[in-house]
Image (cartoon, rainbow, N blue to C red):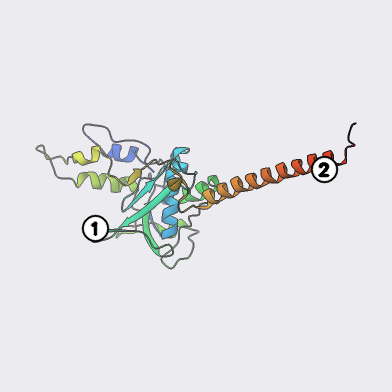
Amino acid sequence: MVRASLPLGDLTTANAFDILPLGKGPDGRIGYPLVSVYLTGRELKDAAEIDASVGEMLGYARLYTAGITYTCNPERMILDRVTEVKILNEDGSEAWPAPDRLYRVVTDLYSAQMFASVQEQAYGLLKIVPKDQDGNEITDFTQAIVRDKDGNEIKAWQCVATYLSSFPAGADGVSVVPEAYAEPAGRKVIAPDASLGALFSNPGTTTSIGIALFVGILVAGFALALLIVRRMHRRQSIEPEHL
């Protein structure tokens, strides 16, 4: 989760710290540590759906990712807006993640713990369960913390600061953030399309529920109309004719 933007001008270590959630790791030191977990391909799609649907309503559910891209249609039913998800392979190519394959995900402790609360907001329609490399659910995230060679927690803000300092240095010897970072990286593609084909193709759970409710209402309406017509016809048939 990113809670602030980097300002224009000179950047400091404090700026790298400010853009991430406040908190402490199990070591009691400032900053959430990184954790290494595994998610299935299906859960990666659900994570993208959380960002596309829930993230619009709840800022803390907004995700910022690397190594994965997705396309969403905001005209579709909520929790069924992501139409395409691709992961970046080591050779630079992109491919759909296999639904049941485990993929390693590195995030901060806050974001990993946040998945449970977001699932509640999604009424269980989206499910993300961080696992270890053997596919077992992680119940103690302290076992998934990424540590340095001395066993110390690697903090998320430290990684951001190190990444910023890795850019080529300018004339004054200070690292300069490339201009490419001033524009979106294309990891989230928003493609509004209100056509029937786009709205109902490959329906997910919420769209399927919506279709079922709509059909149910039509059937109930038709049955009610048919019942009213039959009763009217029956009433007319038993009323005496007036001479």
Decide which of 158, 116 is in the foreground and name it: 116
Depth check: give the residue in front, 124 or 143: 124
Q: Could you tell me residue 214's position as x and y percent?
A: 59, 45
- Outermost left residue: 171
For residue 190, above or below residue 99: above
Looking at the picture, which amino acid does disc 2 mark? Arg
Numbered disc 2: secondary structure: helix
Q: Which residue is mark 2?
A: 234
Residue located farthest toward the front when viewing the structure as drawn:
243
Q: Is residue 164 above or below residue 102?
A: above
Q: Quadrant of the C terminus?
A: top right
**Mark 1 vs 2, N-terminal side:** 1
- The amino acid pointed to by label 1 is Gly
Q: Is residue 17 left or right of residue 131?
A: left
Corner quadrant of residue 190: top left
- Camera-nearest residue between 65 and 169: 65
x, y percentage for residue 55?
44, 41
Report the residue at 53% width, 52% height from top. 205
The answer to whether 148 is drawn above or below residue 191 in the figure is below
Q: Residue at x 32, y 35 (%)?
A: 5
Q: Residues within 10 Å of mark 2 (few under 14, many from 20)?
A: few
Single out the mark in the foreground, 1 or 2. 2
Horizontally, residue 94 falls left or right of residue 56, namely left
The residue pinned by badge 1 equals 92
**3D distance between C-alphas at marks 1 and 2:** 73 Å
Rendering coords of residue 230 (x, y %): 77, 44
Question: Does the residue at mark 1 contact the one at mark 2 (Cβ under 8 Å)?
Answer: no
Report crowding for label 1: few under 14, some 14 to 19, many 20 or more residues within 10 A (C-alpha).
few
Evaluate whether residue 177 shows in this view: no
